[in-house]
Amino acid sequence: MGQSLPHSRGIHQGTPTMAAIIDSEVFLAFSTYATIVILKMMFMSFLTAYFRITRKAFANIEDVHTHMAKTPEEKKKMLRVNEDVERVRRCHLNDLENIIPFVLIGLLYTLTGPELSTALLHFRLFVGSRFVHTIVYVTSMPQPSRGLSWIVGIGAIVSMAYHVLNTVLRL
Amino acid sequence: MGQSLPHSRGIHQGTPTMAAIIDSEVFLAFSTYATIVILKMMFMSFLTAYFRITRKAFANIEDVHTHMAKTPEEKKKMLRVNEDVERVRRCHLNDLENIIPFVLIGLLYTLTGPELSTALLHFRLFVGSRFVHTIVYVTSMPQPSRGLSWIVGIGAIVSMAYHVLNTVLRL
Amino acid sequence: MGQSLPHSRGIHQGTPTMAAIIDSEVFLAFSTYATIVILKMMFMSFLTAYFRITRKAFANIEDVHTHMAKTPEEKKKMLRVNEDVERVRRCHLNDLENIIPFVLIGLLYTLTGPELSTALLHFRLFVGSRFVHTIVYVTSMPQPSRGLSWIVGIGAIVSMAYHVLNTVLRL
């Protein structure tokens, strides 16, 4: 069915049923924003690695390269806690605590068939707020900038959750 | 198709295909319980903030309000580890380690088309066990109450995972 | 529809629509690999408990059994940080940071209708890399074994994310 439509796209390679699900504009938008914000979250791993190497503060003895420290005693000295590393790790954990609920509740929200414009507003507010949150956190900007960016993201999730429960509630 | 049925509900605003997916009683129940337990998990962030403020134990220097500590030295003293805060944070991390697997495996389980009564049993046991787990953890109740509530949740996930693998296994 | 086909299986108990979605070979493979790798992640909780008990290093005072320590002072001594426990916990957190993005992006990737052989390559590389990662991490094998197994998993996720964005991009 889907393959013969004039607006047929690459996503119609699957079964017609799958194409029909994913063919909704809301689902396409959700997939786009969810993928982008998950990639942003995964980027935090690389930022942690960067700070661990530049600050010479490692968590595992096998991670200390031989050209940094030769003797086991020198290596052990580099198993230390560094505030810049911990800051990035807290930011990463905060991402896990917020971005994963967004993707999971956002998926259920998308399946309830919301208006495209309302859905886009939620997705854009959330994804925007998380990029701001990361920049504010990593560069230690003064409060309430981090708190505000965090609460905007929470607000978008709670609003979608309210819409889901309002639509599907079956206890 | 869905819009004209007498039991038509708000969820039928989407494409007919999406309405048909989400129109299953199991999917409605899953969406309800998944949303509730994710909201419960997100509530832990607010509990952490509450304990950080009342215990005056912060992780970031910019989080210490000026009316709490004026000089930088006073502020630095409030960057400390507090056992009540750490307890809530461990509880939150335990939620991430258990609630997210529940939602992901629960979604796959729901799509295999289980009996409604069996599915409801799994969803209710899991969500109930996590509310008990949080109360027991935060109020430091004696063991084995926390261990038991944790293992009931694990049992519900493993049982659903077994059902999924039994139905779809394709390596 | 699905129930009458000769290759009808247990998954056709649901609504025809759900059966049709899950009836794709890619979706069956995704469900299998996602379930296995989530179970592997959940296993880390048991490994943490094992190391906490054998190393006598607990996080909560109520977790110290009376036959291990009788007086409150003895119990408090067992609230300590142990390197073996911390290593397993870091491995578990790394699982959360990588396996959950795999399942979420893998689900969106599956819905775009990729070739079965390409999809299987991504799923197998990722799941294989995470089992190697855990063994290498817990047994403290020298680098770059852990780094390599981690980057293979990241590569599989980024490749699927690229495919999703290439197919569905709607900003």
Image (cartoon, coloured by chain):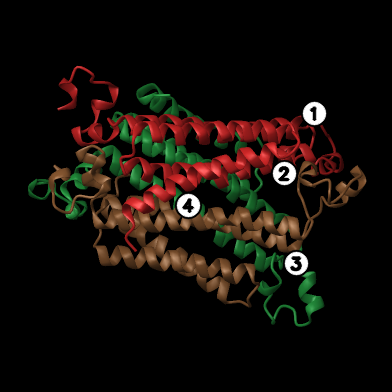
Chain colours: A green, B red, C brown
Mark 4 or 2, closer to the camera = 4
Mark 1 or 3, closer to the camera = 3
Q: Position of residue A73 (x, y in %)?
A: 82, 77
Check the image and report above or below for A50 versus B33: below
Q: CA distance from mark 3 to mark 2?
A: 22 Å
Tell me, for residue C100, which label it has, or none: 4
For disc 2, the neighbor class at 10 Å (few under 14, some 14 to 19, many from 20) is: some
Q: CA distance from mark 4 to mark 1?
A: 41 Å
- Judging from the image, mark 4 belongs to the subunit labelled C
Give the residue type at disc 2: Asn
Tell me, for residue A79, which label it has, or none: 3
Mark 4 or 3, closer to the camera = 4
Residue C125 in view? yes
User: Is residue A165 shown left or right of residue C88?
Assistant: left
For disc 2, the marked residue is B60
Q: Position of residue A167 (x, y in %)?
A: 35, 23
For disc 3, the neighbor class at 10 Å (few under 14, some 14 to 19, many from 20) is: some
Q: CA distance from mark 4 to mark 3?
A: 28 Å
- Judging from the image, mark 2 belongs to the subunit labelled B
Q: CA distance from mark 1 to mark 2?
A: 16 Å
Badges 3 and 2, same chain? no
User: Is residue B18 shown left or right of residue A130?
Assistant: left
Check the image and report above or below for C148 versus B52: below
Tell me, for residue B67, which label it has, or none: 1
